[in-house]
Amino acid sequence: MKRRKLSKEFKIKAVELSNVQGNTKEIAMELSISSDLIYRWRRELELHPDLVFSDNGVKQLTEDQKELEQLRKQLKDVTMARDILKKAVSIFSKSDRKY
């Protein structure tokens, strides 16, 4: 089954309808979509109203958000390298004590 590509306007209208009428499952049935989609769209719209629902399905990040994402990745890599070095030091220091 081919995936449907829903427009930004459709998603916003679905969220607005669910906010006004309140019955998300009923609205989802009328629109032939999953109620989980409406819940997810609502959450995304609340968190990032200016970035949500880009046309290609990928969130458009601001420069600050891109930099933050890059810094988090670097922090994760450096933390992993540090942990590996700590383990290596403890292993080598234990083997030195045996002799």
Image (cartoon, rainbow, N blue to C red):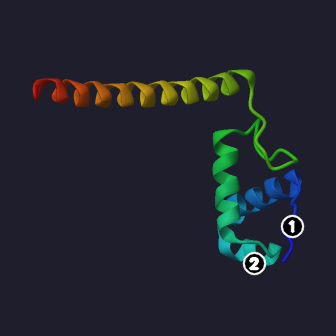
Q: Which residue is drawn at 16% across and 29% down?
A: 94
Q: In this view, does 10 lie above or below 23?
A: above
Question: Does 14 sit left or right of 90 as displayed?
Answer: right
Residue type pointed to by label 2:
Met
Q: Where is residue 6 in the image (x, y as percent from the top left)?
A: 86, 60
Q: Which of marks 1 and 2 is nearer the N terminus?
A: 1
* Image quadrant occupied by the C terminus: top left
Q: Is residue 99 above or below residue 10?
A: above
* Category of crowding for the residue at label 2, using alpha-carbon neighbours closer than 10 angstroms: few (below 14), some (14–19), many (at least 20): few
Q: Position of residue 80 (x, y in %)?
A: 44, 31
Question: Does 47 sit left or right of 62 as displayed?
Answer: left
Q: Residue at x 38, y 31 (%)?
A: 84
* Category of crowding for the residue at label 1, using alpha-carbon neighbours closer than 10 angstroms: few (below 14), some (14–19), many (at least 20): few
Q: Which residue is drawn at 56% across and 25% down?
A: 74
Name the image quarter holding residue 2.
bottom right
* Image quadrant occupied by the N terminus: bottom right
Front residue (pair 31, 53): 53
Q: Position of residue 92 (x, y in %)?
A: 24, 26
Q: What element carries label 1?
A: loop
Front residue (pair 4, 95): 95
In this view, the mark in front (1 or 2): 1
Distance Cα–Cα, label 1 vs label 2 = 15 Å
Circle 1 residue: 4
Q: Do the residues labelled 1 and 2 touch (CB within 8 Å)?
A: no
Residue 29 is labelled as 2
Front residue (pair 26, 76): 76
Q: What element carries label 2?
A: helix
Residue type pointed to by label 1:
Arg
Q: Is residue 77 above or below residue 16?
A: above
Q: Residue at x 70, y 76 (%)?
A: 26
Front residue (pair 68, 92): 92
Question: Does 35 sit left or right of 97 as displayed?
Answer: right
